[in-house]
Image: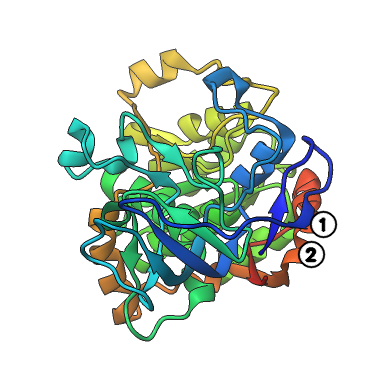
Amino acid sequence: MRAAVLEEHGEPLVIEDVEYPEPDRGEVVVETEACGVCRSDWHAWQGDWSWIGASVSPGQILGHEPAGVVAAVGDGVETLEEGDRVTVPFHLGDGTCPHCRDGRSNNCESVVPLGLSSAAPGAFAEAFPVREADLNCVELPDGVGFTEMAGLGCRFVTAYHALVNRGRLQPDQWVAIHGCGGVGLSAIHVASALGARPVAVDVRPEPLERARELGAAETIDATAVEDVGREVLAITDGGADLSVDALGIADTCRNSIRSLGTRGTHVQVGLTTDDEAGSIELPVDVMTLREIDFHGSHGMPPVTYEELFELIQQGTLEPGKIVGETLSLEELPGTLAAMNDYETVGIPVVTEF
């Protein structure tokens, strides 16, 4: 089968023929119908994350935002059969650790990241295996397409979990979103759809325009103001109730914290780049005096997808609105390269394999 393989960090992915996967016990093989192209793929391609022991090795098939059809079922799988339409979270739990047993497999003690580990070849391929399939595969609701579901395994669910489960989003709150890539635009759409007032912050006009289309109440061009935090404080008459760093660089993280009013909540979604190498200096005096909460947020447990699906079926949430473009596997290397200069808008999705 065809797959996009990382041969060398920073060099174009190579489209080549690889062996079609066979399911081991507890696994299924999913034939890929669509797979989002995420900034985490870009990080892996660049060779980032050595500081957390997660640097991806050459030979890896990337891709961790898939939707597809179950093509083969291994022994021991009880809830899935060939032909089932599924999505898969990027964090593959083992189903046995305390966090998995508590319904929080996104925090699994032995998590294997789809497409970011040799133990889990990714979905930039015609097909890919899924371990502990009964836990990690989520059946798609009727009436939704694969392309709109492609970002569900990472950015859209990550945004929803960050806002609703970690940030405790409430209607009419001011929510500042720093960084309007795929996860940031998803967060703006979710916040607006659930009755909050998003403030979108970015340095480019195109994503800010998309943010307005998705429901941003206000937008800020960070290159046009001296102090982003102060600008948010002025717009919101005292500070946002909730703020999200959706990018993971030092400026967006600190700006997010400084955007908050008293007893506000910061949620960190973006992982850092090589410049920060996992550590960012924080305005701790501001955090102390304003009693600001700082939360990390990682993916979303599959057992909670049902609440998201209900909102999608009701028409409250529309993940397809975040899709920026569809492309073929051959176009994937160029799309990753475009992320060097933040040239993509929304979620690019590979739909031709």
Q: Do the residues labelled 2 and 1 touch (CB within 8 Å)?
A: yes
Q: Closer to the camera, 41 or 170?
A: 41
Instruction: Give the image quarter of residue 190.
Output: bottom left
Question: Is residue 72 positioned above or below 171 on the image?
Answer: below
The location of residue 98, given as percent across then percent down, is: 18, 32
Q: In this view, does 265 lie to the left or right of 330?
A: left
- Badge 2: how crowded within 10 Å, few (<14), some, or many (20+)? few
Q: Which residue lies furthest to the left in this view?
A: 102
Amino acid identity at mark 1: Gly
**Which type of secondary structure does the marked residue at label 2 adopt?**
helix
Residue 334 is marked as 1
Color theme of the render: rainbow
Q: Which mark is residue 36?
A: none
Using the numbered discs, state the Cα–Cα distance from disc 2 to disc 1 in whole angstroms: 6 Å
Query: Can I make out residue 204 in this image?
Result: yes
Q: Which residue is drawn at 71% across and 35% down?
A: 58
What residue is at 73 percent from the left and 53 percent from the top?
204
User: Secondary structure beneath disc 1?
Assistant: helix
The residue beneath circle 2 is: 331
* Residue 189, position as x, y percentages in the image: 46, 64
